[in-house]
Image (tube, rainbow, N blue to C red):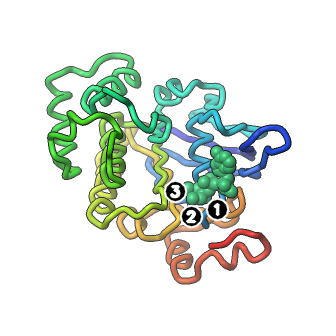
Amino acid sequence: MSVLEIRDLHVTVGEGDDAKEILKGVDLTVRSGETHAIMGPNGSGKSTLAYSIAGHPKYTITGGTVTLDGEDVLAMTVDERARAGLFLAMQYPVEVPGVSVSNFLRTAATAVKGEAPKLRTWVKDVREEMTALEMDPAFAERNVNEGFSGGEKKRHEILQMRLLKPKVAILDETDSGLDVDALRVVSEGVNRSRAELTGDDAIGVLLITHYTRILRYIQPDFVHVFVNGRVVDEGGKELADKLEAEGYAAYVKDSKETA
Ligand code: ADP
Ligand code: MG
Ligand code: MG
């Protein structure tokens, strides 16, 4: 049983006089076996939360804590975060010139597990996962992120998650439109991990989204409404239905945020 705990997290972007506080005291707990959705309007700081947990250098932590099973995540290097069991797709560079998907995945698995996966089972595992994600085998020989479509990026992200088997995965559904097929296979990948991995291997999922669309495929156990840098409401999956019907207006009426 693993637990990711975010306590009173404050984060700024920019420097000196330009520094702007984006996260204004985020509290959130994600346990293995649970799926949490964070939903909020554009610009509310959802991606900033993901990047901050990933250790992106652009974001400055000015207060609060993030721990995984009691270990201080914020004190870890990006690699240490991955080895500790956090999966954050955005921690990897946008493009990795000259590195094939196949080599990238094996290098990542070796780094996370501390030893190279056995070649025979590894090749089989990669092939099976790619088939399940409806990916062409030729994709494995392409360079990482080079000319990937939105759907290919997301499939690659879920392929990594499936193979690396993290304790907690943070998935930012970048608000750019995924087509329905990509949305479905990506969601099925997440749901396979939720269903197959049990006991000590169970995965916690933090799914960040602007739309309720993906929540028709991935049913969250908990929904957190995120507005203006903090969690302002929490509930079960029925809260997503309410947001679908009513939008974020009730939560942003006193702020400059727009839904
Ligand atoms: P969301 O993912 O909820 O749409 P973001 O976290 O992307 O929100 O952005 C929250 C706010 O922080 C926005 O006002 C955005 O312009 C600002 N912001 C985010 N990242 C940066 C950055 N690297 N530099 C400057 N401003 C940023
Ligand atoms: Mg956004
Ligand atoms: Mg975002």
Residue 84, above or below 154: above
> In the image, 79: left or right of 9?
left
Tell me: is circle 3 under 8 Å from ligand 3: yes
Q: How far apart, in angstroms, are the residues tagged by discs 1 and 3?
A: 10 Å
Q: Earlier in the sequence, mark 1 or mark 2?
A: 2
Callout 1 touching callout 2 (CB < 8 Å): yes
- Assign a secondary structure to mark 3: strand
Q: Of residues 134 and 15, which is closer to you in this image?
A: 15
Q: Amino acid at mark 1?
A: Phe
Q: Of residues 113 and 138, which is closer to you in this image?
A: 138
What residue sits right under mark 3 in the picture? 208
What residue sits right under mark 1 in the picture? 226
**Label 1 crowding class (10 Å Cα cut-off): few <14, some 14-19, many 20+?**
many
User: Ligand 2 shows up in which quadrant of the image?
Assistant: bottom right
What residue sits right under mark 2 in the picture? 39
Q: Is residue 119 visible?
A: yes
**Label 3 crowding class (10 Å Cα cut-off): few <14, some 14-19, many 20+?**
many
Percent position (x, y) of residue 155?
31, 49
Q: Earlier in the sequence, mark 1 or mark 3?
A: 3
> In the image, 94: left or right of 195?
right
Residue 229: which quarter of the image?
Answer: bottom right
Tell me: is circle 1 under 8 Å from ligand 1: yes
Q: Of residues 88 and 221, which is closer to you in this image?
A: 88
